[in-house]
Amino acid sequence: MQALLKLSRGIDFAIEQFGRLSILLVPLLIAVGFYSVSARYIGREIGRRLTSNAIIEAQWYLFSLLFLFGFAYILKHNVNVRVDFLYAKWPPKRRATVDFLGTIFLLIPFCLLAIYVSINPVLSSWGRLPNGTFGMWEVSPDPSGLPRAPIKSMIIVGFGLLLLQAISQAIKYAAILTGTVKEEVASEIETYQAPAVE
Amino acid sequence: MNTGYEWLSILMFLGFFILLMSGYPVAFSFAGTAMIFGLIGLSVDAFPLARLLLLPNRWFVIMSDFTLLAIPFFVYMGAMLEKSGLAEELLETVGILFGSLRGGLLLAVVFVGTLLAAATGVVAATVIAMGLISLPIMLRMGYDHKLATGTIAAAGTLAQMIPPSLVLVVLSSQIGVSVGDLFAGALVPGLMLSASYAIYVLVVAYRNPLLAPALPLELRTISGRALALRVLKVMVPPVLLILAVLGSIFKGLATPSEAGAVGAVGTLILAASNRRLSMKVLEDVARSTARTSILVIMILFSSTFFAVVFDGLGGTRFVTQFLTDLPGGVLGFIIVANILVFLLGIFLEFLEISFIVMPLLVPAAQVLGIDLVWLGVVMAINLQTAFISPPVGFSLFYLQSVVPKEVDTLDIHKGAIPFMILQLIILGLVIAFPEQTVAWPVEYLTRPAD
């Protein structure tokens, strides 16, 4: 169990870094969004094209990265909506049971399925042809747009991170259930945190 | 064509609710139920595996959706106003401004609630912020507990109703209407709600001054020119900013995400020019924006999976058929839809409801020829009501979590009842007069500028 907890701490550390990256993407996204709209208007005034499809698309690329990297992060921090009439009143062990079972039987299989169904679309976006060879990768249909293959691949990365964090959570819930960690420590593991949306 | 497995789709819904009641997170309950019933559906050949292989495409559509891109921008605006302390200053100033009136503080709460609602669009945040800021003063002044808490809960809940709001953005993507139209449609009913609260608190305070006395002179720390200047300084910029954001969306000068980006930078400048910007504020705002946006999209990804399986089992067709076969046509549909959404609103937040129910209502509404913008607005008012309906309204819980000990929980719930009645009246008006309350404002506000 101690070895598993060590693994869990390692995963937590890595996911925390991705979470920080997501948070850093917020000001960047706002900057690009603001540049894009001001460039459109200023460009029209002075009769020059200051913005491009690449900049317009960069906005949703950034937002996609922000949330795909963030799925695991909000799981780690228990940023979640729960219907907690019962849950909030239960003792930590019963709460951990619900979360442990849910993680093992629902969340982990969901991540695996999401990765599985995404592999083929992503490979064909990188240009894989039906005969197994690779051709051109998928690019935006608009002129000077961005390549699609990298951002599509991020779906797999996002669910991969979520899978890792789900494993880490399962270890922590199991540790609470087996009594490996004491209840005081268990509360630090953030099995439950009330505010859903800040 | 019927799949013969519609009963499985009904079971799927039940399974989802049981899972929710266990306290398992909503975001993963959708996907979890879809996993289980997807496997069952595949094993009985209710739908082919190819249907599940479509999922990445559906997710990719969400990623590249420019409407949803507006979410982080609007969340940022609200978070900045709150975490920088600008919202608090606004409430104080307006409180002093209206302080000489009986019930003046209540009026200030309604007024600022409406403004914050326009800026933030996150109900929990608005209710909690106003509860923390204004309730202690009102209690010290001897305001009636029921009246004070009822006003805070009702005004704070306006956040979902008054554009631009996060909820309306999500709702518009779920029912397939333009955000601008939905914003314009929600504007008049939203203002009607806030006006009805204002009139109500003034009438009550006028008839019984003991319930909501005017501020004594010594608490009105500034007056005259100083007050006028302060009002100009704290009230005008945010109001202008919100009007600019809304106006440019209505007139088609900017897309919602463009207007949101400008609004976000605007609040940033506002906070900076009031010397309220620090590294800590910037970090808090970015974190809060990231967390809220990630959560919304996580639920959306998960509920998309749910919808794919539910539809595969024939559930969507089944519900559409049921809703269109109701006696009474449009009115029957609206009544059933309202009861359904109200009941769900008791234990689900607006976001989840728009993900679960709206996709089911929309096909039936289209068959019946119902205006989708109007339908969205009606549902928004309905949820507004569900949020403050005792004993289970969400806003009441949020408020409960921040009130001082001397306030009785029962008073919070009793205090909400008059506001609930006001909302039901407005709901009735909007249903009875769709032309005047929704259709006309949409047409007028979204007329292109030239």
Image: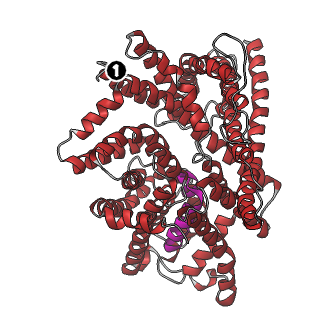
The image shows residue B115, relative to residue B298, as above or below, that is: below
Q: Is residue A172 visible?
A: no
Q: Residue furthest left?
A: B327
Residue shown at 61% from the left, 68% from the top:
B244
Q: Between residues B119 and B361, which one lies in front from this camera angle?
A: B361
Residue shown at 62% from the left, 44% from the top:
B292
- Left of B351 or right of it: where is A112? right
The image shows residue B189, relative to residue B42, as above or below, that is: below
Q: Between residues B423 and B378, which one lies in front from this camera angle?
A: B378
Answer whether residue B301 is magenta in the image. Answer: no
Q: Specify start and end residues of the magenta stretch as a single range.
A: B106-127
- Left of B408 or right of it: where is A14? right
Give the total number of marks visible in the rendering.
1
The overriding secondary structure of the stretch rendered in magenta is helix
* Mark 1 nearby-residue class (10 Å; few <14, some 14–19, many ≥20): some
Could you say which quadrant of the image residue B361 lies in? top left
Q: Between residues B360 and B351, which one lies in front from this camera angle?
A: B360
**Callout 1 amino acid:** Leu
Q: Secondary structure at mark 1?
A: helix
Q: Is residue A43 visible?
A: yes
Residue shown at 61% from the left, 60% from the top:
B254
Report which residue position mark 1 lands on: B8
Q: Residue furthest right?
A: B279
Q: Whole-percent x and y of residue B283?
A: 77, 49
Q: Whole-percent x and y of residue B256?
A: 59, 55
Q: Whole-percent x and y of residue B236?
A: 64, 75
Q: Whole-percent x and y of residue B410?
A: 41, 54
Answer whether residue B115 is magenta in the image. Answer: yes
Could you say which quadrant of the image residue B43 lies in? top left
